[in-house]
Image (cartoon, grey):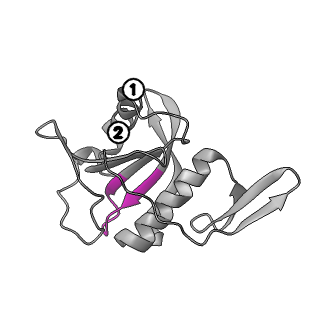
Amino acid sequence: MQELNLPPFESKVTQNGENLLIWDVLRRRHVVLTPEEWVRQHVVHYLINHRGYPKGLLSLERGHQYNQRQKRIDLLALDATGQPLLLVECKRPTVPITPAVAHQIATYNLTIGAPLLLLSNGLQHYCWRVDAEKRTNELLGEVPAYDAPHPNPSPLGEGL
């Protein structure tokens, strides 16, 4: 487990009736501030401000097909060629990170083919490198910076 200790960021929170809303820099609009959204926004700002991921290469809640079912991934970072680089799954802080939760992101990645996976509930964070050809996973001590050398993406990610 990685202790990211996600740094605070300058959030823009407003009230709309009974709902708190937070400004989403990627979607460029206010979204309902749920516990999972709070984690997602922290991860987004961490990747942009501390790991150098370009905003334009981050995609939130992108739909994809898995087993003929429509699923939504929380966050996907693309490399400079538009191929999947980092797949992120965010859970609210009350959801413990269990093998079943890790299995969920690994299953999504079967069709996406990102070489890096990040799983966070805001309190616990796991990042690992996936080698689809060798069928191995390597737990990493930190989220690699965007400009760090990355392995070649899995051929599964081509054409997304």
SS at circle 1: helix
User: Dot 1 surroundings within 10 Å: few (below 14), some, or many (20 or more)?
Assistant: few
Nearest the viewer among 78 and 9 is 9
Q: Residue at x 47, y 52 (%)?
A: 75
Query: Would you say residue 32 sits in the magenta stretch?
Result: no
Residue furthest right as drawn: 17
Q: Residue at (58%, 46%) from the top-left corner? A: 36
In the rendered view of the protein, which quadrant contains the N terminus?
Answer: top left
- Where residue 3 sits in the image (x, y, percent)? 35, 52
Q: Nearer the viewer, residue 111 or 119?
A: 119
Please state the horizontal and vertical placement of residue 42, each as a whole percent of the image. 52, 59
User: Is residue 80 highlighted in magenta?
Assistant: yes
| Extreme residue toward the left, this view | 134
**Which segment did they paint magenta?**
75-86
* Tag of residue 111: 2
Q: Is residue 43 left or right of residue 129?
A: right
In the image, residue 157 lies at what x, y percent?
30, 48
Question: Eyeballing the image, is 121 above or below 153?
Answer: above
Q: Amino acid at mark 1?
A: Ala
Q: Is residue 96 left or right of residue 148?
A: right
Categorize mark 2 by other alpha carbons within 10 Å: few (<14), some (14-19), many (20+): some
**Could you tell me the amino acid type at mark 2?**
Thr
Would residue 131 appear left or right of 92 to someone viewing this image? left
- Quarter of the rendering containing residue 136: top left
Residue receiving disc 1: 100
Above or below: residue 23 compared with residue 33: below
Q: Residue at x 35, y 63 (%)?
A: 82
Q: CA distance from mark 1 to mark 2?
A: 18 Å
Observer-nearest of 133 and 22: 22
Q: Say which element carries label 2.
A: helix
151 displayed left or right of 116: left
Asked if residue 94 shows in the view, the reply is yes
